Image: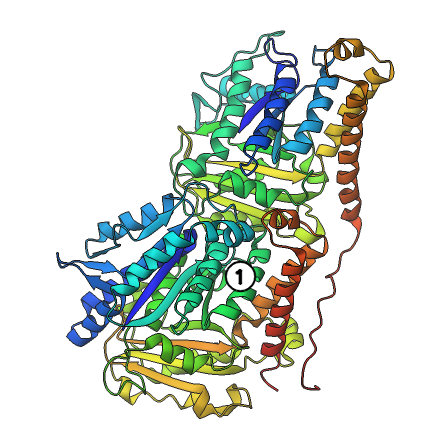
Amino acid sequence: MSVVTIQLGQCGNQVGQELFDIICNDAEQSQRKTYSTSCSARFFRPTSKGDLVARAVLVDMEPKVINQSMNKAVKSGRWRYGEDSHFSQKQGSGNNWANGYCVLGPRHKDAVEELVRQEVERCDALAGFIPVMSVAGGTGSGVGTYVTQCLRDIYPTSFILNHLTWPYGTGEVIVQNYNSVLTLAHLYQLSDAMLVHENDTVHKICSQLLNIKQISFSDINMVIAHQLGGVLQPALTPDSYGVYSRNPLGELVSALACHPEYKLLSVSTVPQMPSSSIAFSTFSWPALLKHLRQMLISNTRMEVERTRSLTQGGFNTSLANLLILRGKDVYSAETGGFEDPAIYTPWLRSEEAFSLWKSPVSFDKYEKFATLVSNSQALLRPLDDMVRKAWNMFASRAYIHQYIKYNISEEDFLDSFTSLEQVISSYGQLQC
Amino acid sequence: MFTLQCGKQRSCKSTGSGLGTRVLSLLEEEFPDVCRIVTAVYPSAEDDVITSPYNTVLAMQELTEHADCVLPVENQSLLDILNKIDAMSYGTKLGPGVKRNNCVTSGGSRLSGAQKPFDAMNNIVANLLLNITSSTRFEGSLNMDLNEIAMNLVPFPRLHYLVPSLTPLYSLADVSIPTKRLDQMFSDAFSKDHQLIRANLKHSLFLASALMVRGDVHMSDLRRNIERLRSSLPFVSWNQEGWKTGLCSVPPVGHSHSMLALSNNTCVKATFMELRDSFTKLYKKKAHLHHYLHVDGMEQSIFSEALSSLTGLIEDYHHLDVSKSRLQRDTPRLRIATGSSS
């Protein structure tokens, strides 16, 4: 079954291009034909010339980034985007969610829907959609939310997994917290689940684990794409009976997002090190899994005092976890540590809360590679920060006239704040 | 985007301010959805057009009502910048890294006593415009176009006067710039020497700031410098992280990197108060008023309205200034009723 990816805005188009690159690379490097075939079918379509074309639609309100992404793909020599699979304008969204959602989205609805429809028709079977977008700007966030709404309307039974990049806490876009609040509140009603990467967290991976001295967005995007690859590449699931799963999005959603109040998913992967060090390292499953479990429960994002008030504890409680193991000796890996009831909310049995997928094929250059997708309190603190800052700004009504100009009212803001306070409250009480 | 002059440049006294602002309101009528960013040249104190305060205040009402953003530029600041470049290019303290004749103005400048080098001064303003449009014209890892500038830097509709500052003022011949020099670029952007109006950013309150960086600068350099500078730059309580950033890969010709800072800062209040005082000095005595009232369609009420608009603007900035010393705590959050009793 095939996944249709929709790349929205600068971030979405940059991340998406890196993702397809990693997936294509991984598929080609693999020695196992069933893996490569499954992977290619999922994310690419073959053409009459025999080259691989990404099952993707590229959308942006200005042309430069799409052009860059398409050129980079062609330069790789291994895959490319469809020549007509993109839509762009000249003016941009001005970092204004209301402009993206109320004006530009509806204005270009038909054109974008047509591109998606063409891509869907080229799939033998549709596994679902992955809109890739940031929440801070105007196109990814505003147009992205509108497009997600259109997808939900036209394909009501398809799975929609949004990939969201959350901005740095400081210094990218001044109105980023408004745009984020509006996006998240709306997507909560539309999306099956949201897979989130935060720039701050990825930045720490780059500086502390990958030893990159001067970090650029290109580095950030590659780490994000790499972690996503660990999630999305073919794997054997409990429901797939010995073949690579044909319903990856559906199985991911049912493993992790069983309750409508809890849709925020975070990703961690081990090992994570400069590629130059990989050849000199040895990996054992017990060590990798112990490390991953420790990362989950301590969740280095959480500083103790602040979190205590949010979670009444400081310990990261999970609703559900999905562990994906790739590489050598996956069948003998001992994963009991992730079935410990102590790390889960008391109102689900740990057997229901924990899912395990495996692939005997190694991912990237790693002999053993583990990905953990978590529905837990890991994003609670960043979400709370986002809402707190947006609320403080809203209290002074700063910038609100820019949104009202495009038909988003104070009422709409209040509705979004209310929805997200509900989400914060729900996650805050997971350990009860 | 267009530029208008409120004071004297060449032989235009009031064409820029009068005709320019009329064009502005026409643009708003015809193209209401298109962003209007105006570079406005403000007169210096010793401007030799006597009625320039009238022209300026009348123009300002139009700018306040009809522009999305205004980038005020003062002739005196442009002159000061040229003098600094001169001193660096031709002075004894010539460092190994300074290239002659490759500075922000074309072909250097030779200042004689009475003559103002308008070409060189205009060149600086042209550079401002080049920088502000760089992300629209070239690619980069974090694009920032004109609409985004207006969106992020204007929290309240009338408070849209943005202080521009440009660095560097001279080129560095050294290609592999050590980090110290790069960081210096960020510090310079907030120093008075690099601003295009004379006002003290650091002693007033920032409402928002945008940094448009061009060239071989990584996002981590940008973030490191924002962290470094934050503590010395006071931001309004509801916008403590009020930074909008852009990274454009292509630097200006002859430089390896450059930066434009646009700051929405209450320091403009001082500039406007000076302007109001010069206006009032003339207006009280009705000096030269008849020249204006002779023109069809001009009435005295237009003057009093313009003065009142300026006064209102000054009060708006003052109101925010006063909040600077107040300790702001987080606004109480919405409380959600929960089903369970905890």
Residue B125 figure quarter: top right
Q: Is A93 left or right of A113, judged from the image as shown?
A: right
Q: Is residue B45 left or right of residue A419?
A: right
Per the image, label 1 sits on a secondary structure element best described as helix
Which residue corresponds to the image point at 37% horizontal and 67% vertical from the top-left? A129
In the image, taking residue B195 as reference, residue A159 lies left or right, namely left
Q: Is residue A11 above or below residue A225?
A: above
| Image height of B300 relative to B267, above or below | above
- Give the colour scheme shown: rainbow
In the image, B111: left or right of A148?
Answer: right
Q: Give residue A308's position: percent from left, percent from top.
A: 65, 77
Q: Nearer the viewer, residue A366 or A15?
A: A15
The one nearer the camera, B167 or A194, is: A194
Quarter of the N terminus of chain A within the rendering: bottom left
Residue B280: give x, y in percent of width and height. Answer: 83, 21
Instruction: Name the subunit of mark 1.
Output: A
Q: Position of residue A244 (x, y in %)?
A: 25, 79
Q: Quadrant of the C terminus of chain A?
A: bottom right
Residue at image position (56%, 56%) is: A179
Quickly name the residue at label 1.
Answer: A183
Residue A207 vertical placement versus B54 (above, below): below
Q: Amino acid at mark 1?
A: Thr
- Which percent across, then down, holds residue A423? 59, 73
Q: Residue furthest right?
A: B285
